Amino acid sequence: MKTIQVDTIEKYVGETVRDPYGRTIGKLVGFYSEVDGTVTAIEVAKGDLGFETISAARVDITPDGIVVLPEWKTEALSLARQIERAKKRAKALEDLYSRNEIPRYAYEEFKKKLEHTMSKLKSKSQEVKALLRKRIGELEDETIHIEKALTAVKMSYIAGEMSEKAYKLAAETLRSARDKNLDEKNDAKKMLEKIIKLEEEPVQLKAEEKEEAPEPAVEPPAAEEPPVIVQVLEG
């Protein structure tokens, strides 16, 4: 798990915080940390809209500054990593047992633990998928709203109610917002597809992957023909 230290985050106080799609969230005005210097959360001022405390798990420091991941993405990435790790462990356990490298009692104990883990992950997966679908729906609604606003702007410009300068500024702002919504929507869809695929993929065992080549068929030896006996008659 990534960690952020106080001496790293302190350099960004007062700078703009954005999401992965280029939207401005606000400005970094503070942070919360443990006695060992590990940052647990940051405080972001959202203009006149107030403040927001954001978990350090959602914070990524990039060459372009601080990026805050959406909650749905943090949850989805964490779930995907846990499912992948659990499947790898299950595969390793089954492979070891199939090669008689571990006793049955150890196999049964670890298998029971893994089954319990997978059951919890399955419940968590339902929650995360619901979160993803909800966000996708919100983004689709927002996009429809933006398209309506863009249509109204175009009509006003064509009707001569808006100057070209004002039209270009408004249209550019709306198109940028629409494109960022589309980027996030596509990202959320990819994460949803990834989680569904991980759930459906069976654990493949190495013993099953290595199929022995069939032995070549051996043809039975040809039956010997009976000898031909030639009888010589005396004259």
Image: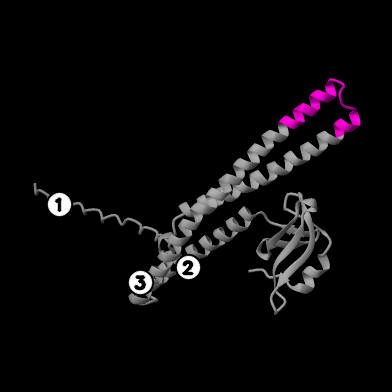
- Is there CB contact under 8 Å for labels 1 and 3? no
* Magenta span dominant secondary structure: helix
Give the residue furthest to the top.
159
- Position of residue 103 in the picture relative to residue 77 (left or right): left
Q: Magenta segment range?
A: 148-168
Which amino acid, by three-letter code, is at mark 1?
Ile
Q: Earlier in the sequence, mark 1 or mark 3?
A: 3
- Is there CB contact under 8 Å for labels 1 and 2? no
CA distance separating discs 2 and 3: 14 Å
Q: Secondary structure at mark 3?
A: helix
Considering only vertical position in the picture, is 163 above or below 87? above
Q: Position of residue 111 (x, y in %)?
A: 39, 69
Q: Which mark is residue 229?
A: 1
Residue beneath the point at 73% across and 64% down: 42
CA distance separating discs 1 and 2: 75 Å
Q: Earlier in the sequence, mark 2 or mark 3?
A: 2
- Position of residue 158 in the picture relative to residue 134 (left or right): right
- Which residue corresponds to mark 3? 108
Q: Position of residue 5 (x, y in %)?
A: 74, 73
Q: Position of residue 32 (x, y in %)?
A: 72, 70
- The image quadrant of residue 176 is top right
In the image, residue 156 lies in the stretch drawn in magenta:
yes
Viewer-proximal residue among 167 and 195: 167
Q: Secondary structure at mark 1?
A: loop
Viewer-proximal residue among 25 and 172: 25
Q: Which mark is residue 94?
A: none
Which amino acid, by three-letter code, is at mark 3?
Glu
Q: Earlier in the sequence, mark 1 or mark 2?
A: 2
Considering only vertical position in the picture, is 120 above or below 3? above
- Which residue corresponds to mark 2? 89
The residue carrying pointer 2 sits among few (fewer than 14), some (14 to 19) or many (20 or more) residues within 10 Å by Cα, namely some
CA distance separating discs 1 and 3: 73 Å
